[in-house]
């Protein structure tokens, strides 16, 4: 089923009658692999209403959807990016969530809150979990005191000192929401941070390096690997290059060499291998992403951030 139809199905649901629960997610790493534990946090009826409205507002305001790619820009206005949850760490988190009981699988102390990586707003009815809002937390989401100010709470017609209270803040937005095996991304940056997509990009980059070495694409791949490192901007470019696979097409590489000479792009070759230099590295990555495009209208060439194939049949 196309992701657009899945979003329509979600928007057609009556979620206002769903029960609302809140769960926190803790992360720990073992041999550089992320593992997660999920616990529920009991909440009162007033907070349930506010949390429900946060998720419903995002769903209502999401009207256009496009597939997530490593190099796609942040979603704009009423747009969301979609990805199958199984391709992300959310799949592991959600699998664990489904096995928990909101009444018994709850946090034991405040330390479990302080050390959380994210929280989830869960909308559930008699048929089970219908939708989930996911928010990645800052390094320390416990509300910090303002210098030279005393925090007080006005209750029962009096001020109470909050010195011993544990005060946390919940945002009025989420980074993504989940429905029917799909994630709909509202913040690309927070989605990648919260679900460790950088780790996936590093693995993907290593796979590309191995492939281009076997194919003898570059005369000096060390400059590429050193510059990319764990830089997320470059890792996105590498992921797109591997996904498109143009580097594996000898005709594409031959055409790249011919056009570089004809148009003065200054891409150097040693026999049939691309020679990377500090000056041309960014251009080489752009070309391998097929993002140097020619305008038929102005006869100019442009480097673009995102290229969408024209489909005249739509």
Image (cartoon, grey):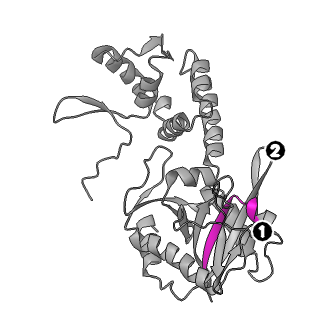
Local secondary structure at mark 2: loop
Q: Residue at x 57, y 16 (%)?
A: 220
Q: Quadrant where the C terminus lies?
A: bottom left
Determine which quarter of the picture holds residue 114.
Answer: bottom right
Q: Does the magenta segment cover residue 116?
A: yes
Residue that label 2 marks: 31
Local secondary structure at mark 1: loop
Query: 256 above or below 35?
Result: above
Where residue 160 appears, as percent x and y from the top left, is: 70, 76
Residue that label 1 marks: 164
Residue 108, labelled with which disc?
none
131 and 111: which is toward the camera: 111
Q: Does the magenta segment cover residue 206?
A: no
Determine which quarter of the picture holds residue 106.
Answer: bottom right
Query: 55 above or below 267?
Result: below
294 and 273: which is toward the camera: 294
Magenta residues (range): 113-123
159 and 115: which is toward the camera: 159
């Amino acid at each position: 089923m196309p992701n657009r139809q899945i979003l329509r199905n979600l928007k057609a649901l009556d979620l206002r009658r769903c029960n609302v629960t809140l769960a926190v997610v803790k992360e720990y790493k073992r041999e550089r692999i992320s593992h997660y534990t999920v616990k529920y946090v009991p909440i009162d009826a007033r907070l349930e209403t506010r949390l429900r409205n946060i998720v419903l507002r995002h769903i209502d305001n999401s009207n256009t959807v496009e597939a997530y790619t490593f190099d796609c820009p942040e979603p704009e206005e009423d747009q969301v990016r979609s990805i199958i949850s199984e391709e992300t760490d959310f799949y592991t988190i959600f699998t664990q969530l489904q096995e928990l009981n909101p009444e018994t699988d709850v946090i034991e102390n405040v330390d479990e809150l302080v050390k959380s990586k994210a929280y989830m707003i869960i909308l559930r009815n008699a048929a089970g979990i219908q939708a989930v809002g996911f928010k990645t937390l800052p390094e320390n989401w416990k509300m910090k005191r303002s210098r030279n100010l005393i925090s007080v709470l006005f209750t029962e017609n009096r001020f109470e000192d909050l010195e011993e209270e544990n005060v946390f803040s919940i945002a009025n937005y989420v980074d993504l929401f989940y429905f029917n095996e799909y994630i709909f991304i509202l913040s690309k940056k927070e989605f990648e941070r919260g679900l460790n997509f950088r780790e996936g990009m590093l693995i993907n980059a290593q796979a590309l390096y191995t492939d281009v070495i076997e194919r003898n694409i570059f005369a000096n791949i060390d400059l590429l690997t050193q510059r990319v490192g764990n830089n997320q901007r470059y890792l996105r470019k590498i992921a797109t290059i591997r996904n498109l696979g143009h580097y594996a097409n000898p005709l594409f590489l031959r055409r790249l060499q011919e056009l570089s000479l004809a148009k003065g792009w200054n891409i150097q070759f040693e026999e049939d291998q691309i020679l990377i230099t500090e000056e041309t590295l960014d251009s080489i990555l752009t070309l391998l992403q097929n993002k140097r495009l020619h305008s038929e209208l102005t006869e100019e060439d442009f480097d673009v951030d995102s290229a969408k194939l024209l489909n005249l049949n739509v």
